[in-house]
Amino acid sequence: MAMLGLRFDLRVPDFSSTTHTAQYAACLEMCEWADRLGLDSIVLQEHHGLPDGYLPAPLALAGVVLGRTPRIPVSISAVIAPLHDPVRLAEQLAVLDVAAPGRISVIAVIGYRAAEFEMAGVERKGRGALLEECVDVLRHAWTGEPFEWRGRRVVVTPTPATPGGPMVMVGGGSETAARRAARLHCGFFPTHGDPALAIAYEDEAKQVGYTEGFCGLPSGPGFVMVSEDPDATWDQIGPSVLYDTQTYESWQDPPQEFLTVAYGARSWEDARASGVYRVLTPDECAEIVEEQGEFGALVLHPLMGGIPPELAWESLELFEHKVLPRVRPS
């Protein structure tokens, strides 16, 4: 059956009627809800230096989520690897894995917003090499044995509870990223569903002798909300949708390809017409989940663009009572 989850970036634009405090409280309550209902994952995102307060410390929030829930895995999608000290990253992930064994994973990316690299004092042009270095450091660190890094002796303790450490995957939207993931012996999570990326990944995996790889091409809409009256809900969330898609598009230079962006939208009606953002009746949502099949996924983004918690909860409660019993009757 398709994987079901929630994702959060916890942005609050100026026009939103909510606050960061309210969004974070709602996020934690929603994670508990997802855990109770048997959903499959919580996804936390990362960006820095944005006026809307985009989640800058997903590992810190992951620790709170893991402490509030007994079962559900948490994925950081994505960790902008060049912006992190890899030794500190290894320590934080090791501690999370010891505290909640097997429940934390990361998708490492090279990043793309120039302002973030300037803020961190990191040269953007070397980001690919920095990601590869980061993955190498994580793997050495999680052995618990001393190793040399940039001329320094490093030891990371405690070692993770998971043998070999938390799962580390690589994300991206180019054939270069696909080949890098295979070369690093990591799974690959593309930003869009171009089959050429899977072909490049599989080709590189074969060349480097990596037989345990996987490539999870995304499919389906980038945003789903459940409503008994989609037109009325669109009137309420339209500004949040337009804000979300226009800001993501504006950050990309040159333009990237993301499944979750309605490129060229100049109104929320344009974004709605793109099909990237969908407000569905419970029956329509169940059909989307069923169409995804065994290897598909539906990841809800209930607080996107500063959607108020009370409106987000209306959607989640419909999902719980009218969608979930159909797609997961057990």
Image (cartoon, helix red, strand yellow):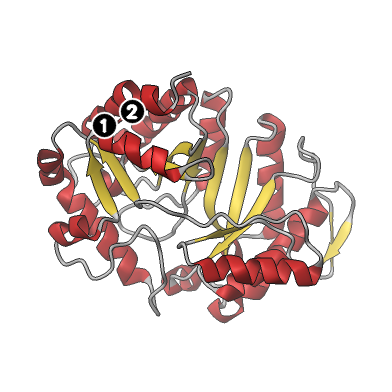
- How far is disc 1 from disc 2 in space, using C-alphas? 6 Å
- The label shown at residue 142 is none
Q: Is residue 36 above or below residue 7?
A: above
Tell whether 249 sits left or right of 152.
left
Residue under the point 23% across and 57% down: 243
Residue under the point 31% across and 71% down: 250
Tell whether 88 sits left or right of 52.
right
Among the 4 quarters of the image, the one containing residue 165: top right
Tell whether 87 sits left or right of 147.
left
Residue 26 percent location from the top left of the image:
34, 31
Amino acid type shown at disc 1: Pro
Comes first in the chain, label 1 or label 2: 1
Q: Are marks 1 and 2 in contact (CB under 8 Å)?
A: yes
Residue 53 percent location from the top left of the image:
35, 51
Among the 4 quarters of the image, the one containing residue 214: bottom right
Residue marked by disc 2 = 323
Residue 149 percent location from the top left of the image:
81, 65
Q: What kind of element bears circle 2?
A: helix
Residue under the point 10% across and 39% down: 232
Q: 74 and 315: which one is in front?
A: 315
Can the viewer see residue 321 in this picture?
yes
Q: What kind of element bears circle 1?
A: helix
Amino acid type shown at disc 2: Val
Residue under the point 40% across and 80% down: 254
Q: Residues within 10 Å of mark 1 (few under 14, many from 20)?
A: many
Q: 190 and 68: which one is in front?
A: 190
Residue marked by disc 1 = 282
